[in-house]
Amino acid sequence: MSTFFQNQQAARRNTKLLVLLYLLAVAGVIVAVDAVLAAVWLYSSSGIAMPRAHAPGVLALAHAVPPRILVLGALGTGALILAVSGWHIVQLSGGGDAVARMAAARRVATDTRDPLERRLVNVVEEMAIASGVRVPAVYVMDGEAGINAFAAGYEVSNAIVAATRGALESLNRDELQGVVGHEFSHIVNGDMRLNIRMIGVLAGIVFIGAIGNFLLRSQRGSRDSKGAAPIFAAGLALLLIGYVGLFFARLIKAAVSRQREFLADASSVQFTRNPDGIAGALDQIGLSAQGAFIASHRAEDLSHMFFGQAIHVQLHGLFDTHPPLEERIERASPRFDRASYRKSRRPAAAGVEAELEGSKPGAPAAAAGAEAGRRGADIGTQWGRSAVEAAALVGALDSGKVDYAARLLAALPAGLRERLRDAEQARAVVVALLLAPADEVMRSQLASLEAAGLQALAARAREAAPLVAPLGAGFRLPVIDLALPAIKGAPEAARQELLRALELVIHADRRVSLHEFVVLTLARSQLAPLRKPGAVGRRKLAELRPQALVVLSLVARAGTRRDAPGEALASAMRAGTAQLRWPEAPAAAGVSLEAASAALEALQELAPLEKAILVKALFAAVTDDGVITVAQAELMRLVGAVLDCPLPPLLATIDPAKLAA
């Protein structure tokens, strides 16, 4: 099975294929426009000698038309198509949020009390934590009765998941989980970037037809039949040309997206361990009067992104963006019996009020206090995986991790999860994660916030501190992930204020831990990214050798034994550099927060397969002694998060309660 990095690289190759198909489609539209221009010129011109009967008709007509007409027509059409495509690509630079706006989707508040929306948010949170993906923002298409959903975004760490109101009302939790698992496959397999680019480039191809449709509508009911005739004829001609563009656009979407749907269905089954979930959702589409149909006028533009066939097309086998429902059900669950499932095995879609109750945290998981939480960081296990096998975990939708994520969420202290749904409280919780356990140091950290004019944030962080202090290392990344959706929805000033607060807290005790610098770098990458939306990493590891050695040194130090730190550190560095196939290098000493953060930010620019090599080296260093602790595992997950290489929980066999007790 291909890895996350191979899928990301394959998605880039598909982008090149998309460009080739796009250029062929543009050529087809140009030929159609020139044919219409030639016909119009011949019809409107006088004194043109008709072609001889024995001469080939098409060639003779072509010779009768001045070349400048055809050249200008080709240049003008090409320029128009490219301009429209470019404009749409710029419009979509906002990534998933921009696509959601196109679909008229509404962002769901993180603290929503709507039971259907709460269920969707809970499912997305569970699957994000299980896969190591940053929790996506959740959207609902309120006006859509069809059963459908999509995921969109340029980066794995900045995706969104949207579902129709019909999906929320028609599907039970297992079926909704199957659909969301399908969309998470698109997130980790690199499909989203290609899908957004397809929206932009194909918009130019169908634009000419849209002009023709507009001209035809503008002449309806016109009383000036003589004056309307030329406009009507022009509109009809452009509409016919538009069908040429639509033909190519649908052909491209079908060619690129259809097989990806089978892969996403299979990944959903692997992720949820419940074939009936996605098979049942597909069965409900077949039962529904609306099916998966999307009524929005942008449905054509977005059709390749949806979970189900969103538009009605002619020539189903040729233009469908999705395989037939029967075939998808058969592949996802070969033993699926529709009659039996509907009659007796399908859990009821009702009872969603339990989601609101279930989202309330239960008993505190960490009554033993902060010292127990710190002991939880030392819990570990024999690793037993090679560096190659460890790197293959990136982007893996592994069975069993969803159950672990649900248990971990249930183990959060009372009141903490509700705080993470509110933007102001979520900011305070992230700050509280970096507060020192010693009262004197904590007072100094909070005083630094107050001195900087952040009294309100300091007060909330002080209130949140008792809730997060008992948490072990295994809870830190999930807590940050749960906080990010609410924080990302806050104003820009609030996000920048949080970053400033984190820097103040980290520097207040005059020492910077490895955990602190990675948390700050992760927050920066999510709230103030340096890369432009849609930017593609292309750099080689050899170009970033100093930065790679800095991060390798830091990770190697985290994996060293306390009884022989020098010898263990040297051994870890040898293991890491061996994976990089570089000469042995000593661990970097005295690395500053700024230098370490800059190194990680620079490494975000690596090409996918280059990131794979780096991740193998980091795993080799941190597990050189054959053991991985909770602290080391979560450090690797944090580094992976910064590099946009999502790692699922690495020690899912450990009871979450033991991480903080």
Image (cartoon, rainbow, N blue to C red):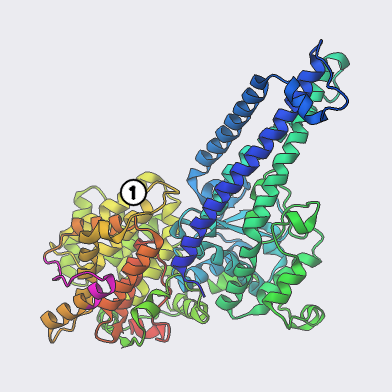
Q: Is residue 291 above or below residue 619?
A: above
Q: Residue at x 41, y 76 (%)?
A: 649
Q: Position of residue 466 (x, y in %)?
A: 31, 71
In the image, taking residue 374 as reference, residue 537 lies left or right, namely: right
Q: Is residue 304 above or below residue 219?
A: below
Q: Position of residue 481 (x, y in %)?
A: 41, 64
Q: Residue at x 75, y 65 (%)?
A: 324
**Residue 225 placement: quadrant:** top right
Give the residue at the far front of this rendering.
54
At label 1, counting other C-alpha atoms closer than 10 Å, the crowd grade (few under 14, some 14-19, many 20 or more) is few
Q: Residue at x 74, y 52 (%)?
A: 311
Q: What are the residue bounds of the magenta stretch?
A: 575-589
Q: Main secondary structure of the magenta part?
A: loop
**Residue 329 placement: quadrant:** bottom right
Q: Position of residue 223 (x, y in %)?
A: 87, 17
Q: Position of residue 564 (x, y in %)?
A: 12, 85
Kindly state the secondary structure of the residue where label 1 is placed: loop
Tell me if I can see residue 629 in this picture.
yes
In the image, taking residue 103 as reference, residue 287 lies left or right, namely: right
Q: Quarter holding the C terminus? A: bottom left
Q: Is residue 373 above or below residue 179?
A: below
* Amino acid at dot 1: Leu
Q: Residue at x 47, y 62 (%)?
A: 8
In the image, taking residue 375 as reference, residue 66 lies left or right, namely: right
Tell me if I can see residue 436 in this picture.
no
Q: Which residue is mark 1?
A: 530
Q: In this orientation, which residue lies closer to the viewer: 92 or 455? A: 92
Q: In this orientation, which residue lies closer to the viewer: 140 or 644? A: 644
